[in-house]
Image (cartoon, grey):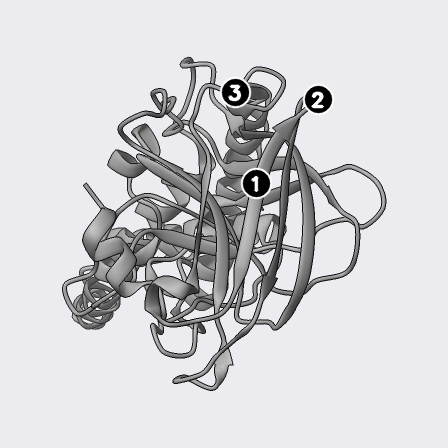
Amino acid sequence: MARTSWSLRTGGFAAAAAKVIALSASFASASQDHEIVIENFDDPVHVWTTMNDPVMGGKSSSAIAIEDGIAKFDGEVAIVPFLNAPGFIQMLTRGGGSGPYPDLSACTSLKMNLTATEEYSGYRVSFGNVHLPEGRHAYGYKADFDAPVGEYGDVVIPFTDFSSKWDEATGDQIVSCDDDAKYCPDVNTLKDMKTFAIWGEGVEGDLHLRVKSISAVGCSSGEGPPSPFHLGVDMLGATREGAGEGIANASKGNETRAKGKGLLGSPFMLLGGIVAFAAFLSFVIEKRSRRNSYAEVLGAAFASETV
């Protein structure tokens, strides 16, 4: 009989917790409908240029022109002879002559309005100058995207799709933001990106991209709860750190109940952690978009040009 009573109590708690989470998510969604412009090519505030793999002995080439409110990025990603693998091209803007970057720390996703004139499967986008201690040439947070062909469309990439942990030789993502929160974009970088780039990388071929604007969406108005992105990242880290402790506490609680003292606090805490973690996973799955890769040849260029 005691078992049935416990099951009913935990079931009721889980249902109540789920309702609270749903209501919180609904409230958060209502307050996160703002968009913050990073660049509008009708009236650009940043200085844009290109960088290609010839800085490391490659043969790729590209050019950018801003005309009629559109950034036209054209180029060819060629094989780097000494790597025997495709290199990279990029249109980028960085500190110095560029205008200030807006604070995006209350936003959930990056949005780019763009189109391509033909298919190309090696598009990437990156921002920031974060550099991992174990890394050599990889800087910033990076994600992959697919460009709509033949007509303009919004490409929305959740910040949870960006990671700073990339293989510098192959360009493959080693650890995603979803897998380890320490590789997610940090708040300081979202407050000031410092540099932003759109790439053709790791896939040989021609690309012709047309970009109208770059912005961040899902931004909080400054009232109500923090963005789901940061709640989720914080929750992920806290859940991982506390999972072992919660299980241990639950085990101690079982021992205490066996002695007749009946401790319910620890199991409730564990159940709350499970429900919260499940809510975060649901958010991540809903927001996930697409992914592709990262390249090796960037090193010397960043080493010589990064401020």
- Amino acid beneath label 1: Ile
Secondary structure category for the residue under label 2? loop
- Mark 3 or mark 1, which has the lower sequence index? 3
Question: In what quadrant of the picture does the C terminus appear?
Answer: top left
Taking 241 as reference, is 63 above or below it? above
Q: Which residue is mark 2?
A: 68
As helix, strand or loop, the secondary structure at mark 1 comes to strand
Q: Residue at x 81, y 50 (%)?
A: 149
Residue at image location 85% in from the left, 46% down from the top? 150
Crowding near the residue tagged with mark 2, few <14, some 14–19, many ≥20 C-alpha atoms within 10 Å:
few
- Disc 3 marks a residue whose amino acid type is Pro
Look at the image and tell me whether residue 170 can be seen: yes
Crowding at dot 1, Cα within 10 Å, few <14 / some 14-19 / many 20+, comes out as some
Residue 218 is situated, as x and y percent measured from the top left of the image, at 54, 29
Task: Report x, y in % for residue 17.
Answer: 48, 42
Cα–Cα gap, marks 3 and 1: 13 Å
Q: Look at 26% across and 68% down and name the residue there.
A: 247
Residue 264 in view: no
- Mark 3 falls on what kind of element? loop
Task: Kindly report the distance in space between the C-alpha atoms of the residues bearing marks 1 and 2.
Answer: 13 Å
Decide: is 144 above or below 17.
below
Of residues 227 and 153, the one drawn nearer to the viewer in this rendering: 153
Give left or right: position of 19 versus 299.
right
Residue highlighted by disc 1: 64
- Mark 2: amino acid: Asp
Residue at the image point whose x is 36% and y is 25% from the top? 98
* Label 3 Cα crowd, 10 Å radius (few <14 / some 14-19 / many 20+): some
Residue 246 at x, y = what percent? 24, 62
The CA distance from mark 2 to mark 3 is: 11 Å
Mark number, residue 44: 3
The answer to which quarter of the image holds residue 104 is top left
Eye-nearest disc, 2 or 3? 2
